[in-house]
Amino acid sequence: MAAVLAQHALLEARNVHRSFGGVVALAGVDLAVNPGEIYSIIGPNGAGKTTMLNAISGVFRPTQGSIHFNGRDCTRLRTHQIAALGIARTFQNLALFRGMSVEENVLVGRHALMRAGVFECGIHFGRARGEEKRHRASVAAILEFLGLGHAAREPADKLPYGLQKRVDLGRALAVDPRLLLLDEPMAGMNHGEKAALMALVTELNRGRGITVILIEHDMGVVMNLSHRVAVLDHGVKIAEGTPAQVSADERVIRAYLGSEEEVH
């Protein structure tokens, strides 16, 4: 079955290794994420989850192995080249541009899609003028979708934490991604904020057809959102399957989930 999935995968990681000095963060990880899935990666702290997203998004290259997106080997591409292919991500720790408005922060995400040259952009001339209008219209639509339209002109770093997380998501959506990488998007949120963000992710996936790779420690979120789940432990994939299959796997329970009561 794995071979069949790999043939149709939107994102496929093959035997991915990554070491930092003598520390092995990933040790031969294989992933195949199908179009239209919400695919979660879970595991204890230090399992290699964020390292995997960093490898996919081009923050660094695998020590060994390859990553293919839509049939193309993107292992050695730079981050902006990967973004231009249609892969976007959010980050564990908010990295908003301080002093810039919500609109300006999200507009930065459109950079990979801009076609006007540096000179044209600098003097706001020619096609740069029309292009900016189109990008601002796209950003306005994203902000409305995220419930941030009212805050477009507000300094992004002055918003409540939950809304700042939405700005981070908006910047990723500005790339018009086919694949969205979400690195602990619910961290630090209260129950109401999590429920609202889960609804947005569901709409992005089901309504807009965006494939999602999700890293999240809240197992309620993972079990409710995911089509499939992979479990990493010390850089090794120890299990993969539906949420029900993974939550019942003895290796997963020992490594991460704990008792059956904790899973549910």
Image (cartoon, rainbow, N blue to C red):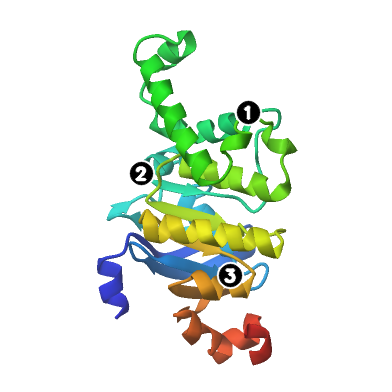
Q: Is residue 13 left or right of residue 55?
A: left
Q: Is residue 126 above or below residue 131?
A: above
Q: State the separation of the CA atoms marked 2 and 3.
A: 28 Å
> Crowding at label 2, few (<14), some or many (≥20) Cα neighbours within 10 Å?
many
* The N terminus - image quarter: bottom left
Tell me the residue at 46%/38% (across/down).
141
Q: Which residue is mark 3?
A: 221
Question: From this viewpoint, which residue is outermost toward the front?
Answer: 150
Q: Which residue is mark 1?
A: 153
Q: Nearer the viewer, residue 264 or 259?
A: 264
Task: Tell me where residue 159 appears, x and y as whole percent.
Answer: 71, 40
Tell me the residue at 49%/45% (across/down).
145
> Crowding at label 1, few (<14), some or many (≥20) Cα neighbours within 10 Å?
few
> Crowding at label 3, few (<14), some or many (≥20) Cα neighbours within 10 Å?
some
Which is more N-terminal, label 2 or label 1?
2
* The C terminus - image quarter: bottom right
Q: Amino acid at mark 1?
A: Arg
Q: Which residue is mark 2?
A: 85
Q: Is residue 172 left or right of residue 186?
A: left
Q: State the separation of the CA atoms marked 1 and 3.
A: 31 Å
Task: Tell me where residue 257 appears, x and y as whole percent.
Answer: 64, 82
